[in-house]
Image (cartoon, helix red, strand yellow):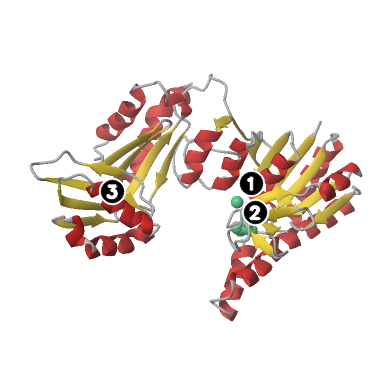
Amino acid sequence: MGLIVQKFGGSSVANTERIRNVARIITDTYKAGNDVIVVLSAQGDTTDDLLEKAAEINPRASKREMDMLLATGEQMSISLCAMAIEALGYPVVSLTGWQAGVRTSRTYGDARVSRIEKERLESELGQRKIVLVAGFQGVNRFDDITTLGRGGSDTSAVALAAALHADLCQIYTDVDGVFTADPRKVEGARKLDEITYGEMLELASLGAQVLHNRSVEMAKKYRVNLEVLSSFSGKPGTKVKEVVKTMEKSHISGVAKDKNIARLALVGLNHEPGTAFKIFSLLAKEKINVDIILQSIGRGDTKDISFTVTRSDLPRAKELLELHHKNLGFERIEVSDRCAKVSIVGAGMIGSPGVAAMMFEALFDAGININMISTSEIKVSVLVDETDADRAVQVIHQRFFREFDQK
Ligand code: ASP
Ligand code: MG
């Protein structure tokens, strides 16, 4: 018993029947003696529909008015769900971000939570009410409504859990938890019982869509006990925490793929100090994010540097480098947007030197060529041809999780 924050995503509240289902989960938690704060997303595709509607009226609408509009989706969910809970006979109140004291930075469309003013929340909880809070929204110093960026309701939930020192923050969604790979695409992918914040952060930034990246960062910072679980299946989900039990059978927690990647290579650069600095400060000034970087050993007077950017940045990056051709002094630029990044993530690889080799062996056995490699403490990424990407994930996954599957 304690304080539990529960967040339900758009698919979990998509229609009347699902709202009733969610109301049951909430009231069961309350009946067990817990204080309950619930954060809801907008129903189904509501946010996308609102965006479309706005674009029809004015494709260049101000961000302030966009936030005013987008925030209505969540408001609909909390009021409807509150009605469902009233019908079940429980005390409940729904609050907008503003009423719940969610204060944010000034930026419309991508605001950060700056603090939670807890008085109202505490007083409602003190009266033993179930408190429903509209996710994804807050209010800035001008008392204007702001939104937290797409997928931001996860962050609303974690922020409330952190501010009120909740015992648990449950993120309910339409999958059973965090998987070792995309279960729709990879045979043998299985649900993880536990994962560390660090691993979850890597997976979230690699495009595993289960949690908003910033929510994981915040959960890590404030040590919020997180659980990702399904609102449909009733099965236990995946716990996200600082350290996990050492009994995990594999050194890695997951295999992920990112196709939103392009590679640039500057061939025949002058082999003199300062070249890398010039290239990457140029890109940084234009806010072009660089991921994997590879510099070749110099041959005589020249060397090559290749690196990856997100695909949408490729034209801009290429243009920029061509513009500074003289100053940078390279022979030519080669680009490719036919690549994908495949990564393994696992806290268990710290101090286990064989892990990267195992990944490379799996790729070698499958005849898949590696174009670039990068590593961090808990991640190994390789760049492969896009056409090899799905197979790469499959063979790597098989290599690491095979023993487990046979048991
Ligand atoms: N409704 C918002 C979105 O679709 C926020 C969220 O669902 O987390 O992005
Ligand atoms: Mg989401």
Q: Is mark 1 within 8 Å of ligand 2?
A: yes
Q: Nearer the viewer, residue 102 or 156?
A: 102
Identify residue for label 3.
277
Q: Residue 191: where, in percent of width, then height?
A: 55, 34
Q: Which residue is mark 2?
A: 11
Amino acid bearing label 2: Ser
- Quadrant containing the N terminus is top right
Seen in the picture, residue 114 relative to 44 is either above or below; the reply is above
Give the class, few, some or many, for how many residues have Cα within 10 Å of label 2's Cα (few <14, many ≥20).
some
Residue 183 in view in this figure: no
Please tell me whether residue 250 is drawn above or below residue 72 in the rendered image: above
Q: Residue at x 48, y 42 (%)?
A: 182
Whether the residues at callouts 2 and 1 have beta carbons within 8 Å, the answer is: yes
- In this rendering, the answer to whether 140 lies above or below 175 is below
Label 2 vs 3, first from the N-terminus? 2
Q: Point out the residue furthest to the left here.
A: 300
Q: Which residue is mark 1?
A: 173
Image quarter of residue 55: bottom right
Distance of mark 3 from mark 1, alpha carbons? 44 Å
Q: Could you tell me how far apart the alpha carbons at marks 2 and 1 are, in whole angstroms?
A: 7 Å
Residue type at tag 1: Thr
Q: Residue at x 74, y 58 (%)?
A: 77
Element class at badge 1: strand
Identify the residue at image location x=25%, y=33%.
364
Q: Secondary structure at mark 3?
A: helix
